[in-house]
Image (cartoon, rainbow, N blue to C red):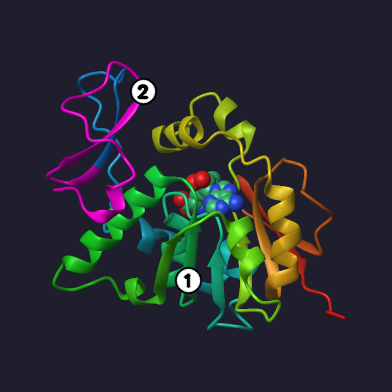
Amino acid sequence: MPPALLSDFPLIQGPPADGFYLQYETAGLTLRHAEAGPNDNGLCLDLLDGNVERRAAGGRKSPLAKAIGLRRHPDSSVLDTTCGLGRDAATLAALGCTATTLERHPVLFALVEDARERAAQIEVRPHWLANWSANIRADAINWLAQQSAQPGFDVIYIDPMFESTRRKARPQKALAWLGELVGGDTDVGELLDLALARAGRQVVVKQHARSKPLAPPDRSVEGKAIRFDIFLVRDRV
Ligand SMILES: C[S@@+](CC[C@H](N)C(=O)[O-])C[C@H]1O[C@@H](n2cnc3c(N)ncnc32)[C@H](O)[C@@H]1O
């Protein structure tokens, strides 16, 4: 019996002739592509594979931690408006933030919920799981528009899907599939405006290192292949 989070998807008796499909497997909920080869393992999100810990290993010196401002504000509450595969959210939680995530795509939301559920079932839960307080299926633009102007989160985080991710020569499979499923997040400008009106301290936008900022940032933190643009919240009138 599929759990409630899958109620939006039609139940099919076998793999479709083309396109993506979801399948329950021993490892967990898995995204598969009908045209993928027989050796393709599909995409099953494993938040316990050590990746979160590796990404958080840089502590407050890591570019993500610097962008959020964790040295001065170690207990920041962060709203990740673009949860995707939840890797940034889990890393933020591992770095000590209280993370709340929003995701509008039902497949991405289902994959992350399934992975969070599996992580919660093991005997020794990862320490960061408790800091990831909620994962909500919603369009962040609608969701933020309904929140009061009183800021509920110190930082609002945006990691949009850009066209360039899809055009990269050999993108990692997870990223390539994400791009194919979700397409480009062309409404990210609207999301930034709304985030600036709702964040308590700042908005952080993750970008490819060489891409043009959405708007002139107050400052940026450079990573290896990425850049975090930081927009400070001005005094509200
Ligand atoms: C590049 S991915 C984010 C990857 C994520 N940071 C991670 O660590 O896995 C962008 C995701 O944001 C989602 N997204 C984009 N705009 C959104 C919005 N307005 N509301 C909710 N989700 C959104 C897309 O559906 C996609 O899954």
Q: Is residue 58 visible?
A: no
Percent x, y of residue 142: 61, 58
Q: Mark 1 or mark 2, which is nearer the start of the sequence?
A: 2
Percent x, y of residue 140: 58, 58
Percent x, y of residue 82: 54, 54
Q: Considering the image in quadrants, where does the C terminus appear?
A: bottom right
Say above or below: 7 vs 63.
Answer: above
Q: Which type of secondary structure does the marked residue at label 2 adopt? A: loop
Residue type pointed to by label 2: Gly
Q: Which residue is drawn at 60% across and 62% down?
A: 157
Residue type pointed to by label 1: Ala
Q: Residue at x 50, y 50 (%)?
A: 104
Residue in front for this viewpoint, 11 or 200: 11
Q: Name the residue under label 2.
A: 19
Q: Which type of secondary structure does the marked residue at label 1 adopt? A: strand
Say above or below: 14 vs 160.
Answer: above
**Bounds of the magenta span?**
1-29
Label of residue 99 in the image = 1
Q: In this view, does 22 lie to the left or right of 135?
A: left
Give the number of the mark in front: 2 or 1.
2
Marks 2/1: CA–CA distance:
32 Å
Q: In this view, does 48 lie to the left or right of 99?
A: left
Hey, which residue is sitting farthest right in the picture? Answer: 237
Q: Can residue 72 be seen in this view?
A: yes
